[in-house]
Image: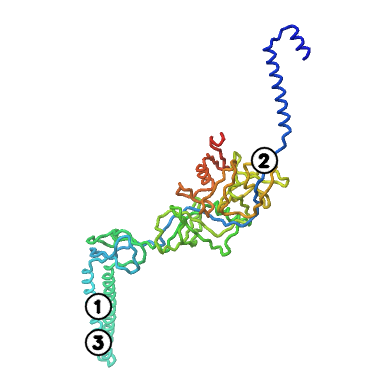
Amino acid sequence: MAFFFSWDFNNSVVDSRHFRLMLLAVSGLLLFSGCKREQSARPAPPPAEVEVYVAKATSVPLTFEYIGQTEASQEVDVRARVQGVVWEQGFSEGTSVTAGQFLYRIDPRPFEADLQVADARSYQAKVAVQAAQRDLNRTRSLTESASIAREELDDATSLYETSMASLRLADAQLLKARLELSFTTVTAPVGGRIGLALKRVGDLVDTGENSLLCRITTQDPMYVNFSISEKDMLEYRNNLKAGRIEAPQTEDFIVEIGLLDKSTYPERGRINFSDVTIDPRTGTGTHRAAFPNPEGLLQPGQYVEVRIIGANRTKTVMVPQGAVMFGMQGSYVYVVGDDDKVEMRPVTATDWEGLNWIIEEGLAAGEQIIISGINKTQPGADVSVTTVTTELDKETPVADSSKSQGITPAADSSASRPYPKDSKMPASPREKAEAQARAAGTTQTVSAETLTTTKSASAETE
Protein backbone atom coordinates (compact mmCIF):
# COMPACT_ATOMS: atom_id res chain seq x y z
CA MET A 1 0.00 0.00 0.00
CA ALA A 2 2.93 2.26 0.69
CA PHE A 3 4.03 1.67 -2.86
CA PHE A 4 0.53 2.49 -4.09
CA PHE A 5 0.41 5.75 -2.17
CA SER A 6 3.89 6.63 -3.30
CA TRP A 7 2.99 5.94 -6.89
CA ASP A 8 -0.14 8.06 -6.58
CA PHE A 9 1.76 11.05 -5.18
CA ASN A 10 4.57 10.82 -7.63
CA ASN A 11 2.27 10.68 -10.62
CA SER A 12 -0.21 13.22 -9.23
CA VAL A 13 -3.14 10.93 -10.22
CA VAL A 14 -5.06 10.87 -6.94
CA ASP A 15 -6.19 14.27 -5.83
CA SER A 16 -6.80 15.27 -2.23
CA ARG A 17 -10.55 14.48 -2.39
CA HIS A 18 -10.03 10.87 -3.36
CA PHE A 19 -7.42 10.51 -0.67
CA ARG A 20 -9.84 11.64 2.06
CA LEU A 21 -12.47 9.11 0.91
CA MET A 22 -9.94 6.30 1.10
CA LEU A 23 -9.00 7.31 4.66
CA LEU A 24 -12.67 7.28 5.75
CA ALA A 25 -13.20 3.77 4.29
CA VAL A 26 -10.14 2.39 6.09
CA SER A 27 -11.24 4.00 9.39
CA GLY A 28 -14.73 2.44 9.13
CA LEU A 29 -13.28 -1.00 8.48
CA LEU A 30 -11.04 -0.75 11.53
CA LEU A 31 -13.96 0.47 13.72
CA PHE A 32 -16.25 -2.43 12.60
CA SER A 33 -13.51 -4.99 13.37
CA GLY A 34 -13.09 -3.56 16.87
CA CYS A 35 -16.85 -3.70 17.62
CA LYS A 36 -17.03 -7.28 16.42
CA ARG A 37 -14.18 -8.30 18.72
CA GLU A 38 -15.84 -6.49 21.63
CA GLN A 39 -19.20 -8.17 20.94
CA SER A 40 -17.72 -11.67 20.71
CA ALA A 41 -16.05 -11.15 24.05
CA ARG A 42 -19.42 -10.41 25.86
CA PRO A 43 -20.31 -13.23 28.39
CA ALA A 44 -23.40 -15.50 27.92
CA PRO A 45 -26.54 -14.55 29.94
CA PRO A 46 -27.39 -16.65 33.03
CA PRO A 47 -30.17 -19.29 32.84
CA ALA A 48 -33.68 -17.90 33.17
CA GLU A 49 -35.32 -18.28 36.59
CA VAL A 50 -38.61 -20.17 36.54
CA GLU A 51 -41.19 -21.55 38.96
CA VAL A 52 -42.32 -25.16 38.47
CA TYR A 53 -45.12 -27.38 39.64
CA VAL A 54 -44.34 -31.02 40.39
CA ALA A 55 -47.12 -33.12 38.86
CA LYS A 56 -48.73 -35.81 40.96
CA ALA A 57 -51.49 -38.33 40.38
CA THR A 58 -54.59 -37.81 42.49
CA SER A 59 -58.26 -38.65 42.62
CA VAL A 60 -60.47 -36.01 41.03
CA PRO A 61 -64.28 -35.75 41.29
CA LEU A 62 -65.92 -36.59 37.99
CA THR A 63 -69.08 -34.85 36.83
CA PHE A 64 -71.23 -36.11 33.97
CA GLU A 65 -73.30 -33.42 32.26
CA TYR A 66 -76.41 -33.78 30.12
CA ILE A 67 -79.35 -31.72 28.94
CA GLY A 68 -82.62 -32.54 30.71
CA GLN A 69 -86.19 -31.37 30.87
CA THR A 70 -88.46 -31.14 33.88
CA GLU A 71 -91.71 -33.05 34.10
CA ALA A 72 -94.45 -33.08 36.70
CA SER A 73 -94.31 -36.20 38.83
CA GLN A 74 -98.07 -36.55 38.33
CA GLU A 75 -100.49 -34.91 35.91
CA VAL A 76 -104.21 -35.56 36.33
CA ASP A 77 -107.09 -34.64 34.02
CA VAL A 78 -110.13 -33.70 36.09
CA ARG A 79 -113.24 -34.82 34.20
CA ALA A 80 -117.00 -34.71 34.74
CA ARG A 81 -118.49 -38.08 35.64
CA VAL A 82 -122.12 -37.07 35.07
CA GLN A 83 -123.92 -34.97 32.49
CA GLY A 84 -125.22 -31.58 33.47
CA VAL A 85 -124.71 -27.84 33.60
CA VAL A 86 -121.84 -26.35 35.61
CA TRP A 87 -123.32 -24.46 38.55
CA GLU A 88 -120.25 -23.32 40.47
CA GLN A 89 -116.47 -23.04 40.20
CA GLY A 90 -114.51 -23.13 43.46
CA PHE A 91 -110.86 -22.41 42.56
CA SER A 92 -108.60 -19.76 41.07
CA GLU A 93 -106.62 -20.69 37.99
CA GLY A 94 -102.88 -21.27 38.44
CA THR A 95 -103.03 -21.72 42.19
CA SER A 96 -102.11 -24.64 44.43
CA VAL A 97 -104.84 -27.02 45.51
CA THR A 98 -104.92 -29.85 48.01
CA ALA A 99 -106.37 -33.32 47.58
CA GLY A 100 -110.13 -33.23 48.22
CA GLN A 101 -110.49 -29.48 47.67
CA PHE A 102 -113.77 -28.37 46.06
CA LEU A 103 -113.42 -27.47 42.36
CA TYR A 104 -116.81 -27.62 40.55
CA ARG A 105 -120.48 -28.23 41.24
CA ILE A 106 -122.75 -29.56 38.49
CA ASP A 107 -126.54 -28.99 38.68
CA PRO A 108 -127.59 -31.63 41.27
CA ARG A 109 -131.38 -31.37 40.98
CA PRO A 110 -131.95 -34.17 38.41
CA PHE A 111 -129.78 -36.48 40.48
CA GLU A 112 -131.54 -35.58 43.72
CA ALA A 113 -134.82 -36.58 42.05
CA ASP A 114 -133.29 -39.83 40.80
CA LEU A 115 -132.13 -40.55 44.33
CA GLN A 116 -135.65 -40.10 45.71
CA VAL A 117 -137.05 -42.45 43.04
CA ALA A 118 -134.41 -45.06 43.83
CA ASP A 119 -135.05 -44.71 47.54
CA ALA A 120 -138.82 -45.24 47.04
CA ARG A 121 -138.20 -48.33 44.93
CA SER A 122 -135.90 -49.71 47.55
CA TYR A 123 -138.56 -49.20 50.21
CA GLN A 124 -141.16 -50.81 47.96
CA ALA A 125 -138.92 -53.83 47.48
CA LYS A 126 -138.46 -54.16 51.23
CA VAL A 127 -142.22 -54.20 51.76
CA ALA A 128 -142.62 -56.86 49.10
CA VAL A 129 -139.98 -58.99 50.77
CA GLN A 130 -141.71 -58.69 54.12
CA ALA A 131 -145.04 -59.78 52.57
CA ALA A 132 -143.39 -62.70 50.79
CA GLN A 133 -141.73 -63.72 54.05
CA ARG A 134 -145.04 -63.81 55.92
CA ASP A 135 -146.71 -65.78 53.12
CA LEU A 136 -143.82 -68.27 53.06
CA ASN A 137 -144.01 -68.83 56.82
CA ARG A 138 -147.77 -69.42 56.71
CA THR A 139 -147.50 -71.81 53.74
CA ARG A 140 -144.71 -73.75 55.42
CA SER A 141 -146.79 -74.36 58.58
CA LEU A 142 -149.81 -75.50 56.56
CA THR A 143 -147.64 -77.83 54.52
CA GLU A 144 -146.30 -79.44 57.68
CA SER A 145 -149.87 -80.17 58.82
CA ALA A 146 -150.69 -81.52 55.30
CA SER A 147 -153.43 -78.95 54.88
CA ILE A 148 -152.15 -77.75 51.49
CA ALA A 149 -150.22 -79.27 48.65
CA ARG A 150 -146.44 -79.16 48.41
CA GLU A 151 -146.63 -77.09 45.23
CA GLU A 152 -147.99 -74.09 47.13
CA LEU A 153 -144.93 -74.13 49.37
CA ASP A 154 -142.70 -74.11 46.33
CA ASP A 155 -144.59 -71.16 44.88
CA ALA A 156 -144.30 -69.20 48.13
CA THR A 157 -140.58 -69.91 48.31
CA SER A 158 -140.07 -68.70 44.73
CA LEU A 159 -142.04 -65.54 45.44
CA TYR A 160 -139.91 -64.80 48.47
CA GLU A 161 -136.63 -65.29 46.58
CA THR A 162 -137.86 -63.11 43.72
CA SER A 163 -138.73 -60.38 46.21
CA MET A 164 -135.26 -60.60 47.71
CA ALA A 165 -133.67 -60.23 44.25
CA SER A 166 -135.84 -57.19 43.57
CA LEU A 167 -134.72 -55.69 46.86
CA ARG A 168 -131.04 -56.14 46.00
CA LEU A 169 -131.65 -54.56 42.58
CA ALA A 170 -133.43 -51.61 44.19
CA ASP A 171 -130.62 -51.19 46.70
CA ALA A 172 -128.05 -51.17 43.85
CA GLN A 173 -130.03 -48.54 41.99
CA LEU A 174 -130.22 -46.49 45.20
CA LEU A 175 -126.44 -46.74 45.59
CA LYS A 176 -125.91 -45.67 41.98
CA ALA A 177 -128.23 -42.69 42.45
CA ARG A 178 -126.27 -41.63 45.52
CA LEU A 179 -122.98 -41.93 43.63
CA GLU A 180 -124.24 -39.90 40.68
CA LEU A 181 -125.46 -37.21 43.06
CA SER A 182 -122.01 -37.16 44.74
CA PHE A 183 -120.37 -36.82 41.31
CA THR A 184 -122.07 -33.45 40.89
CA THR A 185 -119.52 -32.12 43.41
CA VAL A 186 -116.07 -32.31 41.79
CA THR A 187 -113.03 -32.30 44.11
CA ALA A 188 -109.28 -32.42 43.46
CA PRO A 189 -108.10 -36.04 43.25
CA VAL A 190 -104.48 -35.02 44.05
CA GLY A 191 -102.67 -31.99 45.38
CA GLY A 192 -100.65 -29.72 43.11
CA ARG A 193 -100.93 -26.72 40.82
CA ILE A 194 -104.17 -26.31 38.90
CA GLY A 195 -104.19 -24.94 35.36
CA LEU A 196 -106.82 -23.16 33.30
CA ALA A 197 -110.51 -23.75 33.92
CA LEU A 198 -111.57 -25.50 30.72
CA LYS A 199 -115.27 -25.26 31.64
CA ARG A 200 -117.06 -22.23 33.04
CA VAL A 201 -120.28 -21.72 34.94
CA GLY A 202 -123.16 -22.40 32.59
CA ASP A 203 -121.29 -24.81 30.33
CA LEU A 204 -122.88 -28.17 29.60
CA VAL A 205 -120.62 -31.14 30.31
CA ASP A 206 -121.05 -34.85 29.75
CA THR A 207 -119.11 -38.06 30.27
CA GLY A 208 -117.62 -38.16 26.76
CA GLU A 209 -115.28 -35.84 24.87
CA ASN A 210 -116.83 -32.83 26.58
CA SER A 211 -115.90 -34.00 30.06
CA LEU A 212 -112.49 -32.35 30.67
CA LEU A 213 -112.80 -29.64 33.34
CA CYS A 214 -109.17 -28.79 34.25
CA ARG A 215 -105.71 -30.29 34.86
CA ILE A 216 -103.73 -30.63 38.06
CA THR A 217 -99.96 -31.21 38.07
CA THR A 218 -98.08 -32.49 41.10
CA GLN A 219 -94.79 -30.56 41.15
CA ASP A 220 -93.34 -31.76 44.44
CA PRO A 221 -91.38 -33.87 43.74
CA MET A 222 -90.40 -32.74 40.26
CA TYR A 223 -89.02 -35.20 37.73
CA VAL A 224 -86.13 -34.42 35.37
CA ASN A 225 -85.76 -36.61 32.28
CA PHE A 226 -82.43 -36.85 30.45
CA SER A 227 -80.80 -39.17 27.94
CA ILE A 228 -77.37 -40.82 27.99
CA SER A 229 -75.88 -42.08 24.74
CA GLU A 230 -74.94 -45.70 24.33
CA LYS A 231 -71.34 -44.63 23.66
CA ASP A 232 -71.11 -42.77 26.99
CA MET A 233 -72.55 -45.72 28.88
CA LEU A 234 -70.07 -48.13 27.29
CA GLU A 235 -67.14 -45.80 27.99
CA TYR A 236 -68.19 -45.50 31.62
CA ARG A 237 -68.41 -49.26 32.05
CA ASN A 238 -65.03 -49.79 30.37
CA ASN A 239 -63.33 -47.12 32.47
CA LEU A 240 -64.94 -48.54 35.60
CA LYS A 241 -63.72 -52.02 34.76
CA ALA A 242 -60.21 -50.74 33.99
CA GLY A 243 -60.02 -48.86 37.28
CA ARG A 244 -59.78 -45.41 35.70
CA ILE A 245 -63.04 -44.43 37.38
CA GLU A 246 -64.34 -45.12 40.87
CA ALA A 247 -68.10 -45.36 41.29
CA PRO A 248 -69.87 -44.29 44.51
CA GLN A 249 -69.66 -47.00 47.14
CA THR A 250 -73.43 -47.37 47.23
CA GLU A 251 -73.81 -46.81 43.45
CA ASP A 252 -76.16 -43.98 44.47
CA PHE A 253 -75.25 -40.96 42.37
CA ILE A 254 -76.16 -37.45 43.46
CA VAL A 255 -77.82 -35.30 40.82
CA GLU A 256 -77.89 -31.51 40.69
CA ILE A 257 -79.28 -29.25 37.99
CA GLY A 258 -78.25 -25.89 36.58
CA LEU A 259 -80.84 -23.42 35.37
CA LEU A 260 -80.66 -21.20 32.31
CA ASP A 261 -79.74 -18.15 34.41
CA LYS A 262 -76.48 -19.96 35.30
CA SER A 263 -77.65 -20.60 38.86
CA THR A 264 -77.70 -24.03 40.50
CA TYR A 265 -80.96 -25.36 41.91
CA PRO A 266 -80.52 -25.60 45.70
CA GLU A 267 -82.06 -29.07 46.12
CA ARG A 268 -80.28 -32.24 45.04
CA GLY A 269 -82.01 -35.24 43.54
CA ARG A 270 -81.63 -38.96 43.04
CA ILE A 271 -82.02 -41.16 39.98
CA ASN A 272 -85.22 -43.17 40.39
CA PHE A 273 -85.60 -44.67 36.93
CA SER A 274 -83.37 -45.95 34.13
CA ASP A 275 -84.92 -47.40 31.01
CA VAL A 276 -84.05 -50.99 30.18
CA THR A 277 -83.85 -50.37 26.42
CA ILE A 278 -81.92 -48.12 24.00
CA ASP A 279 -83.99 -45.99 21.66
CA PRO A 280 -82.94 -47.18 18.16
CA ARG A 281 -83.83 -43.78 16.67
CA THR A 282 -81.48 -41.78 18.88
CA GLY A 283 -79.09 -44.36 20.30
CA THR A 284 -79.76 -43.14 23.84
CA GLY A 285 -81.26 -44.49 27.03
CA THR A 286 -83.77 -42.50 29.07
CA HIS A 287 -83.11 -41.79 32.74
CA ARG A 288 -85.06 -39.85 35.34
CA ALA A 289 -84.20 -38.10 38.60
CA ALA A 290 -86.58 -36.83 41.29
CA PHE A 291 -86.02 -33.46 43.00
CA PRO A 292 -87.79 -31.94 46.00
CA ASN A 293 -89.64 -28.81 44.93
CA PRO A 294 -91.17 -27.37 48.09
CA GLU A 295 -90.94 -23.74 46.95
CA GLY A 296 -92.23 -24.42 43.44
CA LEU A 297 -89.07 -23.02 41.79
CA LEU A 298 -89.18 -25.71 39.12
CA GLN A 299 -91.99 -25.89 36.59
CA PRO A 300 -92.78 -28.61 34.06
CA GLY A 301 -91.12 -28.17 30.67
CA GLN A 302 -87.98 -26.32 31.78
CA TYR A 303 -84.65 -27.16 30.12
CA VAL A 304 -81.90 -27.73 32.67
CA GLU A 305 -78.30 -28.89 32.81
CA VAL A 306 -78.11 -32.22 34.61
CA ARG A 307 -74.91 -32.89 36.57
CA ILE A 308 -74.36 -36.40 37.93
CA ILE A 309 -71.95 -36.36 40.86
CA GLY A 310 -70.36 -39.14 42.85
CA ALA A 311 -67.76 -40.82 40.63
CA ASN A 312 -64.02 -40.04 40.76
CA ARG A 313 -61.19 -40.11 38.23
CA THR A 314 -58.30 -42.15 39.62
CA LYS A 315 -54.58 -41.35 39.15
CA THR A 316 -55.34 -38.08 37.44
CA VAL A 317 -52.67 -35.44 36.69
CA MET A 318 -53.73 -31.79 36.93
CA VAL A 319 -51.73 -28.65 36.23
CA PRO A 320 -52.46 -24.96 36.79
CA GLN A 321 -54.37 -23.54 33.85
CA GLY A 322 -51.68 -20.94 33.06
CA ALA A 323 -49.13 -23.67 32.34
CA VAL A 324 -51.05 -25.03 29.36
CA MET A 325 -50.40 -23.34 26.01
CA PHE A 326 -51.93 -23.87 22.61
CA GLY A 327 -50.20 -23.98 19.25
CA MET A 328 -50.64 -25.28 15.74
CA GLN A 329 -50.07 -28.85 16.94
CA GLY A 330 -52.47 -28.63 19.88
CA SER A 331 -51.98 -28.06 23.61
CA TYR A 332 -48.56 -28.35 25.25
CA VAL A 333 -46.58 -27.47 28.39
CA TYR A 334 -42.94 -26.69 29.17
CA VAL A 335 -41.28 -29.46 31.20
CA VAL A 336 -37.93 -29.06 33.00
CA GLY A 337 -35.80 -32.19 32.60
CA ASP A 338 -33.14 -33.62 34.90
CA ASP A 339 -30.50 -31.61 33.00
CA ASP A 340 -32.41 -28.34 33.69
CA LYS A 341 -33.26 -27.98 30.02
CA VAL A 342 -36.71 -27.02 28.78
CA GLU A 343 -38.76 -29.54 26.78
CA MET A 344 -41.96 -28.71 24.92
CA ARG A 345 -44.33 -31.57 25.81
CA PRO A 346 -47.59 -32.12 23.86
CA VAL A 347 -50.45 -32.97 26.22
CA THR A 348 -54.13 -33.82 26.01
CA ALA A 349 -56.02 -31.33 28.20
CA THR A 350 -59.62 -32.48 28.49
CA ASP A 351 -61.61 -30.80 31.25
CA TRP A 352 -61.26 -28.32 34.07
CA GLU A 353 -61.39 -28.97 37.78
CA GLY A 354 -61.70 -25.58 39.46
CA LEU A 355 -58.98 -23.45 37.85
CA ASN A 356 -56.80 -26.36 36.77
CA TRP A 357 -56.55 -28.40 33.59
CA ILE A 358 -57.01 -32.16 33.74
CA ILE A 359 -54.26 -33.78 31.66
CA GLU A 360 -55.38 -37.07 30.18
CA GLU A 361 -52.17 -37.87 28.28
CA GLY A 362 -48.63 -36.52 28.05
CA LEU A 363 -47.55 -36.07 31.69
CA ALA A 364 -46.52 -38.43 34.47
CA ALA A 365 -46.35 -37.95 38.21
CA GLY A 366 -43.10 -36.33 39.36
CA GLU A 367 -42.41 -34.24 36.26
CA GLN A 368 -41.72 -30.52 36.65
CA ILE A 369 -43.96 -28.17 34.67
CA ILE A 370 -43.09 -24.48 34.32
CA ILE A 371 -45.90 -22.30 35.68
CA SER A 372 -44.11 -18.95 35.92
CA GLY A 373 -41.38 -17.42 33.77
CA ILE A 374 -42.53 -19.07 30.56
CA ASN A 375 -41.87 -15.87 28.61
CA LYS A 376 -38.18 -15.99 29.60
CA THR A 377 -37.37 -19.33 28.06
CA GLN A 378 -37.84 -21.60 25.05
CA PRO A 379 -37.44 -25.30 24.21
CA GLY A 380 -33.86 -26.48 24.66
CA ALA A 381 -32.82 -23.54 26.85
CA ASP A 382 -31.22 -23.92 30.29
CA VAL A 383 -33.26 -22.70 33.24
CA SER A 384 -32.79 -22.23 36.95
CA VAL A 385 -35.64 -23.49 39.13
CA THR A 386 -36.20 -20.99 41.93
CA THR A 387 -39.53 -22.19 43.37
CA VAL A 388 -41.01 -25.69 43.45
CA THR A 389 -44.76 -25.98 44.02
CA THR A 390 -46.36 -29.29 44.93
CA GLU A 391 -49.89 -28.17 45.76
CA LEU A 392 -52.51 -26.87 43.37
CA ASP A 393 -54.12 -23.57 44.27
CA LYS A 394 -57.79 -23.27 43.43
CA GLU A 395 -57.14 -19.59 42.78
CA THR A 396 -53.91 -19.99 40.79
CA PRO A 397 -53.39 -16.83 38.70
CA VAL A 398 -52.66 -16.88 35.00
CA ALA A 399 -48.94 -17.38 34.29
CA ASP A 400 -47.03 -14.27 33.22
CA SER A 401 -46.25 -15.68 29.79
CA SER A 402 -46.79 -13.81 26.57
CA LYS A 403 -46.54 -17.19 24.85
CA SER A 404 -49.28 -18.76 26.95
CA GLN A 405 -52.87 -17.90 26.28
CA GLY A 406 -53.96 -19.24 29.68
CA ILE A 407 -57.69 -19.74 29.93
CA THR A 408 -59.03 -18.74 33.32
CA PRO A 409 -62.31 -20.46 34.25
CA ALA A 410 -64.96 -18.53 36.09
CA ALA A 411 -64.40 -18.21 39.80
CA ASP A 412 -67.57 -20.12 40.64
CA SER A 413 -66.88 -22.94 38.18
CA SER A 414 -67.15 -26.34 39.85
CA ALA A 415 -68.25 -28.49 36.95
CA SER A 416 -65.94 -29.75 34.26
CA ARG A 417 -67.87 -27.97 31.51
CA PRO A 418 -69.51 -24.75 32.80
CA TYR A 419 -71.75 -22.43 30.84
CA PRO A 420 -70.20 -19.61 28.83
CA LYS A 421 -71.85 -16.28 29.44
CA ASP A 422 -73.41 -16.03 26.02
CA SER A 423 -74.80 -19.57 25.82
CA LYS A 424 -77.92 -21.26 27.05
CA MET A 425 -76.52 -24.73 26.65
CA PRO A 426 -73.53 -26.34 28.41
CA ALA A 427 -70.18 -25.76 26.71
CA SER A 428 -67.08 -27.85 26.41
CA PRO A 429 -63.75 -26.50 27.69
CA ARG A 430 -62.83 -25.84 24.07
CA GLU A 431 -65.85 -23.58 23.58
CA LYS A 432 -65.22 -21.73 26.81
CA ALA A 433 -61.55 -21.36 25.89
CA GLU A 434 -62.61 -19.59 22.71
CA ALA A 435 -64.77 -17.15 24.66
CA GLN A 436 -61.99 -16.47 27.17
CA ALA A 437 -59.44 -15.99 24.39
CA ARG A 438 -61.67 -13.49 22.60
CA ALA A 439 -61.99 -11.52 25.83
CA ALA A 440 -58.19 -11.56 26.20
CA GLY A 441 -57.68 -10.06 22.74
CA THR A 442 -56.68 -13.20 20.85
CA THR A 443 -58.21 -15.12 18.01
CA GLN A 444 -58.54 -18.79 18.83
CA THR A 445 -59.31 -21.37 16.16
CA VAL A 446 -60.34 -24.76 17.52
CA SER A 447 -60.63 -27.89 15.42
CA ALA A 448 -62.23 -31.16 16.45
CA GLU A 449 -58.94 -32.51 17.81
CA THR A 450 -56.71 -29.57 18.65
CA LEU A 451 -56.82 -26.16 20.21
CA THR A 452 -54.96 -23.63 18.04
CA THR A 453 -54.35 -20.15 19.35
CA THR A 454 -53.23 -17.40 16.97
CA LYS A 455 -52.22 -14.10 18.47
CA SER A 456 -53.79 -10.93 17.24
CA ALA A 457 -51.91 -8.77 14.72
CA SER A 458 -51.04 -6.24 17.37
CA ALA A 459 -49.44 -8.89 19.56
CA GLU A 460 -47.40 -10.14 16.63
CA THR A 461 -46.19 -6.62 15.89
CA GLU A 462 -45.01 -6.27 19.46
The reply to whether dot 2 and dot 3 touch (C-beta < 8 Å) is: no
The reply to whether dot 1 and dot 3 touch (C-beta < 8 Å) is: no
Q: Pinpoint residue 447: horizontal percent, then vertical percent.
A: 55, 41
Residue position for label 2: 379
- Residue displayed at 70% across by 13% down: 19
Residue position for label 1: 122
Q: Pinpoint residue 380: horizontal percent, then vertical percent.
A: 69, 40
Residues under labels 1 and 2: Cα distance? Answer: 104 Å
Q: Pinpoint residue 131: horizontal percent, then vertical percent.
A: 23, 84
Instruction: Give the residue at the far top of this rendering.
Output: 11
| Drawn side of residue 279 relative to residue 142, left or right | right
| Drawn side of residue 303 relative to residue 153, left or right | right
Look at label 3 and name its amino acid. Arg
State which mark lies toward you, 2 or 3.
Answer: 2
- Determine the secondary structure under disc 3: helix
Residues under labels 2 and 3: Cα distance? Answer: 119 Å
Look at label 2 and name its amino acid. Pro
Residue position for label 3: 134
